[in-house]
Image (spheres, rainbow, N blue to C red):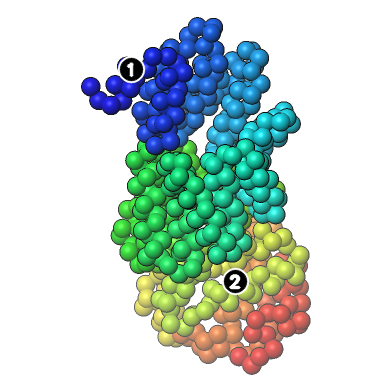
Amino acid sequence: MNPISGQVASAASARDALERASALERAGQLEAAEQLLATALGLAGGSDSTSDRIDALRRIGLVRHRLGQSDRGAEDCRSSLALARSHGSPRQALEAMNVLAGIDLERGELDTADQRYREILAEAGDEIELRGRAEQNLGILANIRGDWAEAERWYRQSLEAFRRAENAKGCAIAYHNLGMISADREDWALAEDSYARGLELAREIGDRHLEALCLLNRSEVLVSVGRADDAAGVARAANEIFAALGSKMDVAAAEKQLGAILRHQGEHEAAEALLARALGLAVATGASLVEAETCREMALLYRVQDRNRESLQLLNRAFAVFRRLDARVDLVDVETRRDKLESTFLAVVRDWGQSIESADSYTSGHCSRVAEFSVQVAGQLGLSEEDLLTIRLGAYLHDVGKVEVPLEILNKPGRLTEAEFDVIKQHPMMGIRLLEGIEFPWDLKPIIRWHHEKHDGSGYPDGLAGEAIPLHAQIVCIADVFDALTTNRAYRDAMGTDRALRIMRESHKWWRSDVFEAFMASAEAGTLPGVGRSL
């Protein structure tokens, strides 16, 4: 008989099974704990054991959630909550509500979690430990939303409550969370001290899960202070504990962190294997935030390997995760994560634009300049920050199709033949084909396809005219023409600014009047990069 079945068989009562399950939970033996809690449910069938049944339902729900069975765990907790209310057990109802709120939080259902925790606080009365837990978790929510001052206030309130209740585990969690706040503020010394206190308490009480959490978050601090080798060892230790506990969500987070560290150390093959595993686990367990963060880490890895298309696909996937979470502006920390994604996206797109230019010895810096010119014009038009970002990204990628144009045409000195120019005119469509299957969070493809269309219908590839041409494409078009005139090309030398602007005035019918006027206003104000210098 194995140790698990022996303990199950020897459980004399529901209360006995619950106590033995507690020891297994603290030791991280979650599957064994689940079996004992299931036994407790079976033994707590009579009316005299209703309280034990309520506890068993709540605890088995939490264990199943940690084992990656969140839907089943939430249903167990709802059953515990309903039974506690019908039995007239307010404390047990609040305990069940606390676990349900925790599941909501980890699923990204933040408003629901917030509502539950505040309800617990309102009903907890003199129950110090329950108040401490609710305050702790409201701190977590404030942290997620980026309100660090509010989060720290809740954490310190909870720490005081747990000290008064002599609850070592609650204190350990409070220290762990204070460490996270300190890390967010880049107060690395205070973060390290807080994690050390939390780790010490977790080890004293034998809470392996909390020990691993302290280790994992400490590894992020070590990376930030330049101790990547130490960080890798600490992250591995955390991962080993999570794996032994069978906590798949946490394994996903640990392997994501370890993969990021290995990427930082240049161990790309090992990093990719870990990140791929982390991504699979995050998806399987519904850990949406870990999924998004892992996609970003893989995108960064692919960026340094010049795998730009794959990198963009992963970043788009990360944005899609945030859309599934219905991330709103008031969720500031989610907004911060999206800002980091945008920065990564911009860096990958910029890199790809530069790699495009490397094929053409005469256009070094072209995409960057067009992006800057375009943003200046868009600013003159009073467009939104979202529009400016869309235009910048589209400008970086506007010539992506040129990677498909033969170099002998792209770099040909002198004037192109009509047939050769016909090939050049296909580069917008080549770019669209190259990006097929990538659904950008911003509307970039119209810029790529139509940045050579002219308002009078004389452009290519589709011969659009007038309002049929999107505004963003018109803005990139005018910036593209200006840069082409003022830089050296294989077939001619660069023009001076005055001559280039004179030619653009003569060709003003190529653009919408408001776009042309905004461009000229930028030129006259000297805000276009390069204007005012002799080129």
Residue picked out by circle 1 = 10
Q: Residue furthest bottom?
A: 534
Label 2 or label 1, whichever comes before in sequence order: 1
208 on left or right of 50: left
- Residue type at mark 2 is Ala
| Nearest the eye: 194 or 34 | 194
Residue at image position (34%, 40%) is: 244
Q: Secondary structure at mark 2?
A: helix
Q: Position of residue 227 (x, y in %)?
A: 42, 67
Give the CA distance from mark 2 to mark 1. 72 Å
206 on left or right of 374: left
Residue 203 appears in the figure: yes
Residue at image position (51%, 17%) is: 52
529 on left or right of 340: right
- Residue type at mark 1 is Ser
Q: Position of residue 117 (x, y in %)?
A: 66, 35
Q: Position of residue 133 (x, y in %)?
A: 62, 37
Residue 500 appears in the figure: no
> Tag count in the figure?
2
Q: Residue furthest left?
A: 1
Residue at image position (40%, 17%) is: 39
| Nearest the eye: 408 or 282 | 282
Q: Secondary structure at mark 1?
A: helix
Residue picked out by circle 2 = 371
